[in-house]
Amino acid sequence: MIELVYFAWVRERIGEARESHETNAKTVHDLIEELKQKEERYAVTFSDLSAIRVAIDQDLVDMDSSIENAKEVAFFPPMTGG
């Protein structure tokens, strides 16, 4: 079981801030593909991966990163400085 956390417009499109998810995915990309098959709201949210950033256990990672042994995967829009 893995905790999924959503921030900003990702949270708004998914409709919740966090959820527990049972997965066999090996990478972030695999997890996203699995979620896209789950429901339309995920397919819409993850349709443009260039607009999504990911953190595993609070460390920023890329889409090919392994999620094995991860406790939490967070999805959010790109960050801007200021």
Image (tube, rainbow, N blue to C red):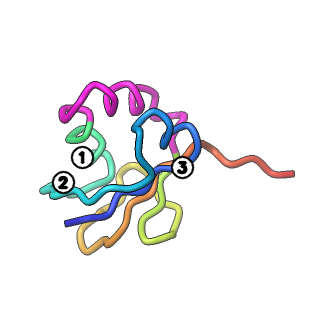
Mark 3–mark 1 Cα distance, whole angstroms, equals 20 Å
Please name the predominant secondary structure of the magenta segment in the image: helix
Give the number of the mark in front: 3 or 2: 3
Q: Is residue 31 left or right of residue 81?
A: left
Determine whether 52 is above or below 28 in the image: above
x%, y% of residue 65?
Answer: 36, 59
Q: Amino acid at mark 3?
A: Phe
From the image, tell me which residue sits under label 3.
Answer: 7
Q: Secondary structure at mark 3?
A: loop
Q: What residue is shown at x 38% (from left), y 25% (from top)?
A: 44
* Foreground residue among 10 and 77: 10
State which quadrant residue 46 falls in: top left
Q: What residue is shown at x 41% (from left), y 46% (from top)?
A: 16
Q: Which residues are magenta?
A: 36-52
Q: Quadrant of the N terminus?
A: bottom left
Q: Is residue 50 covered in magenta?
A: yes
Q: Is residue 1 left or right of residue 16?
A: left
x%, y% of residue 69?
Answer: 25, 74
From the image, tell me which residue sits under label 2.
Answer: 25
Q: What residue is shown at x 12% (from left), y 56% (from top)?
A: 24
Asked if the residue at tag 1 contacts the one at tag 2, i.e. Cβ–Cβ closer than 8 Å, the answer is yes
From the image, tell me which residue sits under label 1.
Answer: 30
Q: Is residue 73 left or right of residue 78?
A: left
